[in-house]
Image (tube, rainbow, N blue to C red):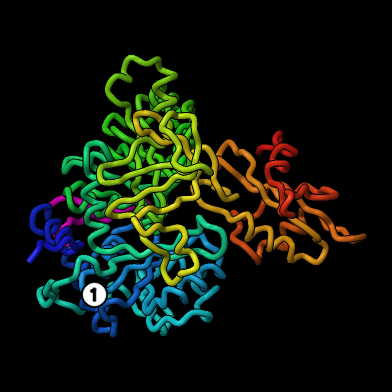
Amino acid sequence: MDFPLTLNTILSRAETIHGERELATRLPDKSWRRYNYRAMAQRAKCLALALGRLGVEPGDRVATLCWNHYRHFEAYFGVPAFGAVLHTLNLRLHADDLVHIVNEAEDKVLIVDESLLPLLAQFRGRVKLEHVIAISDDGKLPADMLDYETIIGKEDENEFTYPEIDENRAASMCYTSGTIGKPKGVVYSHRAIATHTLGAALTCSFEIWESDCILPVVPMFHVNCWGLPYVAAMMGSKLVFPGTHTDAESLLDAYEQEQVTISAGVPTVWLAMLEKLDDDPKRYDLSALRKMFVGGAAVPPSTMQAFQERHNLTMVAAWGMTETTPIGTVSYLRPGQETDSSEEQFASRSRQGSPVPFVEIRARGDEGLVPWDGEAMGELEVRGPWIASSYYERPETDDRFTEDGWFRTGDVVSIDARGAMKIEDRAKDLIKSGGEWISSVDLENKIMGHPAVAEAAVIAMSHAKWGERPLAAVVIRGDQSVSSDELHEFLISQVAKWWIPDLFEFIDEIPKTGAGKFDKVALRKLFDDRQT
């Protein structure tokens, strides 16, 4: 029998080989909860037993609505340990989107942080959950909820026996809003996550060692925290979770206290941190921090240069998507580039980088594949052992996936002769704000739901902190009137708060293409001086 590539092989390794390695979580009062991989594995197995006792069967989906902490980490392994599927929910989404996601995934159980019960209350009546398990410090919960610590405390981890799991069985799933329309589900097999974990640990990728201390700022609901928890467990790295304390001062404090060596987050995290460091450059000892990975959006070369030259901190750019599990490319200087000028090196490092081993990339233009000359542009296509081959329950999207394994990303890129990819634009008019996607089409439809609005087109404008923010061009209907404040108020109940445009520009007519569609190229030219 072939050796199975499953998450249980990683869990067993974490317990037996790295059992004494530390795990730490920042609690609400900023104190630390510390334990180790052995205790994590034992509690994960108790969670698996408890879920089975609640009627969860292999293949059933168990959702989480949680921050970054040790109990969420236990669910990463405990849910798939007996064949169930972990489904992490994005706590930043609007309740309507969460209703769609939970119902389409047919989640059977939800594990939720007590602090997020108000969010759950907004949609629980519209979803079909059999059980809600709340993570609480005092166990004082509504009568219709189960307490996490109570249910796992009733189990004996010695009663758990690792089952034989087909490595192609689903282990987890996430939903992406990075495509037009409703969020789409991506399912990851045990094999996909295991091979992704191996790839992520390589020196030309995240370069993870047992001696590392990893603090992932990226949320655990974002493509399984970019796979970092799995890599840490496999390698035995110390893992530090920030809990809800993700402001720059708290993170810098944690980096110093825990001697963090590797961290990962979106550009907005690093921009806030850079500002804090510039204000008081000698306050923190960050000499242990060897790499800060940035993804979710492009980071300016000037930001990388500022961290390196002013604070001796190294940023590494990476690219991936929900559909790529997520690591696709990582940006490092290649042999021969060490003689380039400082500006050339930072420009190269800010590109999204070269594909990690086992991942292939190419770009396709109107006339076929484009050359790798750093100038020609086309839609990025990617394939590999952990790249998705379809969306969950969405056969109408099958054209995004080719029969020979290529996924059409929708990103427009150039690729240089070294295989380094740079995202030039997006084929679809999506807006990426703080690493989170905003669908311009969905937002337009919501705005046009106002009775005084005849037409609305949404485009991205640059933003110093968030990278991009939405600008809405609005045509008022007939002799009616509406103000920016009124539209803002109208959208509060329609979309997530951070989706609401920063600017509403009222114009007489939205330019159209020859096909009658909104001409967003013309709109961008019209408002190219707008930024916040």
Toward which corner of the image does residue 81 lie, by quadrant?
bottom left
> Which quarter of the rendered picture does the C terminus lie within?
top right
Q: Position of residue 72 (x, y in %)?
A: 32, 62
- Is residue 190 found inside the magenta-colored segment of the image? no
Bounds of the magenta segment: 20-39
Circle 1 is placed at which residue position?
152
- Residue that extends furthest to the front in the rendered view of this protein: 367
Residue 29: tell me if it is visible: no
Q: Is residue 409 left or right of residue 69?
A: right
At label 1, the amino acid type is Ile
Toward which corner of the image does residue 421 lie, by quadrant?
top left
- Is residue 37 found inside the magenta-colored segment of the image? yes
Q: Is residue 523 left or right of residue 13?
A: right
In this view, the residue in front, 498 or 255, is: 498
| Residue at x 37% of width, y 81% of height | 131
> Which quarter of the rendered picture does the N terminus lie within?
bottom left
| Residue at x 38% of width, y 24% of height | 308
Q: Is residue 322 left or right of residue 155?
A: right
Q: Position of residue 344 (x, y in %)?
A: 42, 20
| Residue at x 81% of width, y 54% of height | 475
